[in-house]
Amino acid sequence: MIGFGQIFYFDEGDSATFYNLDILNNQFNYISTFPSSDGGYGSGSTFDPINNIFYITNGFGGMGGDDSTIIIGVDITNGSFISQSIVPHSIQTFEVWDNMCYYFEEQDSATFYNLDILNNQFNYISTFPSSDGDYGSESTYDPINNIFYITNGFGGMGGDDSTIIIGVDVTDGSFISQSIVPHSIQTFEVWDNMCYYFEEQDSATFYNLDILNNQFNYISTFPSSDGDYGSESTFDPINNIFYITNPFGNGGGGDDSTIVIGVDVTDGSFISQSIVPHTIQTFEFQFSLPTSINNTVYNKDRELLMLLNLLGQQTTEIKNTPLFYIYDDGTVEKRIVVE
């Protein structure tokens, strides 16, 4: 496991508080307290890894209209609030990548928009198909292919518990995939056309779904628990780890404590269980790539694991382009190979 991962999480109890969690050391730290609000903070969040900003929504008592929502961005490096963008919609679920927010609202119709955060300008993209079932309260974004995903029961197609995972191209609003699985999906993540999802019914079960081939596979069963697993997840694409929360009997480490559980998507093994004494409302995984090169003496026998571009996407060597070389000893080098 490459050792530079952190979880950022939000807890709205006595106050709306923001923390980080160093997963490897199981050490949490206070970052900041969110502004007080007449409306409740949202149950979902998203993270913009390009700009290191954690986003959450809030009704703020109806500013801009009864259905309006403020999208709040907080800089994870210092806890400062860097943006508050207002849209006249009730946002059901949203994702942000490089200062562009994509959000979904389901009222008179199921409508999809984007929001240019820097200019606070929203635009209609498309209307989702009508449905006998409700669209999901969670979404995910595949930055490799610019696709926003959301779930829908579609009235039980494929079985009463079946779910359709719908992908929409954010560049033009076209619907590019509708994959059916015979499960009630509780939470899911997509990265480069591979979906990882969790369902908790008779047992807490974890699957993957090859979206291009509409083929799902069982990965593993989560440990039994006195408490319920969370309705939100996050994904570490560098180490291939899917994270979900569980209170583990409402009291492991305190009545409001929560365990953040990590599972390796390649083999289903459980690689971390970090306890924090908070009720986690929403959380996101963040990994940091270095921005400078030092004079460290490296192990000559180390092996290259992967190359990443500045977006954190795995790539091959490209001339005249800054890339991050990640090695099996945990070291990372930033290089530009000049042609």
Image (cartoon, rainbow, N blue to C red):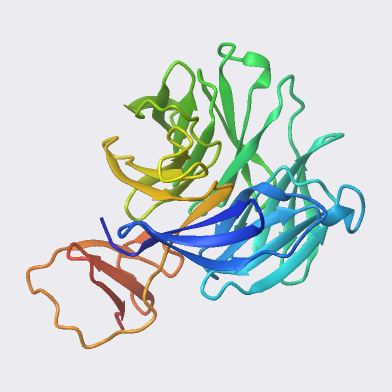
Please identify the quadrant where the N terminus is shown: bottom left
User: Which sits in the foreground, 185 or 306?
Assistant: 185
Q: Answer with the quarter of the image where residue 242 lies.
A: top left
Q: In this view, does 139 lie above or below 2?
A: above
Q: For the image shown, how many numbered marks are present on the structure?
A: 0
Q: Is residue 25 above or below residue 148?
A: below
Residue extending farthest to the right is: 65
Residue extending farthest to the left is: 301
Give me the residue at 39% from left, 52% from top: 237
On screen, residue 113 versus residue 336, left or right, reads right
Q: Is residue 108 above or below residue 20?
A: above
- Asked if residue 1 shows in the view, the reply is yes
Please identify the quadrant where the C terminus is shown: bottom left
User: Which sits in the foreground, 14 or 333?
Assistant: 14
Q: Answer with the quarter of the image where residue 93 lies.
A: top right
User: Which sits in the foreground, 50 or 79?
Assistant: 79
On screen, residue 160 versus residue 34, left or right, reads left
On screen, residue 73 versus residue 8, left or right, reads right
Give me the residue at 72% from left, 71% from top: 118
Give me the residue at 56% from left, 11% from top: 159
- Asked if residue 193 shows in the view, the reply is no
Residue extending farthest to the top is: 159
Give me the residue at 31% from left, 83% from top: 338
Where residue 12 appears, as percent x and y from the top left, is 64, 52
Where residue 179 appears, as percent x and y from the top left, is 53, 28
Where residue 106 appears, as percent x and y from the top left, is 78, 36
